[in-house]
Image: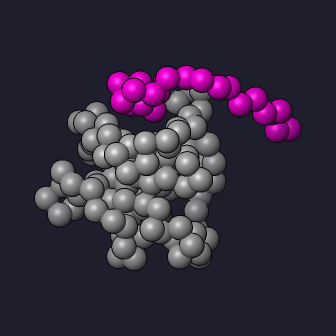
Amino acid sequence: MEIVNNAPQCWEFIRTLRNLDGVREGFIQQKHIDSSTHQAHMEKHGDCYYICLKDDTPIGYTGILEADIRIATHPNHQKKGVGKFMINKLMKICPTAVAKIKMENHASVALFDPCGFVKKYYILEQEENK
């Protein structure tokens, strides 16, 4: 595996992976990301992202935006050390980065714990009217 800089040809991979059922639910913001919104985001922040390749094929992405880690691994490659590999590489780039994780996202907690992250804060929000 290797981590490479994000490039425009990878932008749709990031958007597609981020929007996958089962991946999207792990993020704090869970709305579907349309092409134009994603294009604008990548034009502004694309250099903050990195792509994880295995045999020259994208299998995940990670990045840091405003010191907050963004990470996703394709479901076919989860639970194989890809996420841990990406986090460890990313922390060499930005050792002060933090991870904001939903309390019920047990998979992300299990991913970040062995990478040396500890729980330090809770963010409380008023629940939206349903």
Residue 112 in the figure: left or right of residue 104: left
On screen, residue 57 above or below 97: below
The x, y position of residue 66, in whole percent, is 59, 53
Quadrant of the snapshot with the C terminus: top right
Q: Residue at image x 51%, y 71%? A: 42
Q: Is residue 26 visible?
A: no
Between 101 and 33, the residue placed more toward the observer is 101
Residue 60 in the figure: left or right of residue 63: left
Residue 95 is inside the magenta segment? no
The quarter of the picture where residue 54 lies is bottom left
Looking at the rendering, the stretch of residues picked out in magenta corresponds to 108-130
On screen, residue 82 above or below 34: above
Between 12 and 63, the residue placed more toward the observer is 63
The x, y position of residue 80, in whole percent, is 23, 36
Q: Residue at image x 52%, y 30%? A: 105
Residue 73 in the figure: left or right of residue 108: left
